């Protein structure tokens, strides 16, 4: 897939959600929107 399109979708659809919203990624443990917003190197 297109990484830029994926990141744009995440920023538009998921980042508007609250920091405490839990995300169940396809890999790794559950996380929160706020955690990913602050620490995911692909999204910062």
Image (spheres, grey):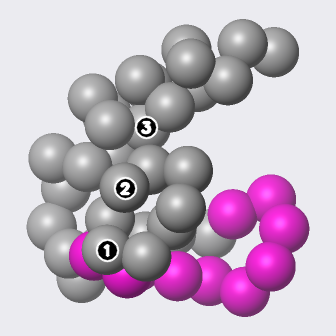
Element assignment for label 3 = helix
Rounded to the nearest whole Å, what is the CA distance between mark 3 and mark 1? 14 Å
Quick one: SS at disc 2?
A: loop
Decide: few, some or many residues near mark 2? Use Cα within 10 Å; few <14, some 14-19, many ≥20: few
- From the viewer's perspective, tell me whether residue 21 is left or right of residue 27: left
Q: Residues within 10 Å of mark 1 (few under 14, many from 20)?
A: few
Left or right: 19 in relation to 33:
left
Point 44% across, 50% down: residue: 43
Q: Are marks 2 and 1 in contact (CB under 8 Å)?
A: yes
**Residue 25 in the image: x percent, y percent?**
69, 63
Residue 38: mark in rendering:
1
Q: Nearer the viewer, residue 13 or 35?
A: 35
Magenta-drawn segment:
25-35
Image quadrant of residue 12? top left
Q: Contact, CB < 8 Å: mark 3 with mark 1?
A: no
Q: For the point 32% across and 65% down, which residue is it?
A: 37
Place of residue 13 in the rendered image (x, y in percent of width and height, measured from the top left): 31, 34
Tell which circle, 2 or 3, labels the residue nearer the N-terminal end: 3
Q: Quadrant of the N terminus?
A: top right
At which x and y percent is residue 8?
41, 23
Q: Is residue 28 magenta?
A: yes
Does residue 30 sit above or below 12 in this rendering? below
User: Which circle marks residue 44 in the picture?
Assistant: 2
CA separation in Å, label 2 and label 1: 7 Å
Mark closer to the chain start, 2 or 1: 1
Name the residue tied to disc 3.
10
Q: Of marks 3 and 1, which one's residue comes earlier in the chain? A: 3
Q: How many marks?
A: 3
Is 42 positioned to the left or the right of 22 in the image? Answer: right
């Amino acid at each position: 897939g297109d990484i830029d399109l994926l990141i744009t979708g995440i920023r538009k659809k998921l980042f508007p959600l609250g920091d405490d919203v839990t995300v169940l990624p396809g890999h790794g443990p559950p996380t929160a929107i706020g955690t990913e917003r602050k620490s995911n190197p692909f999204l910062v």
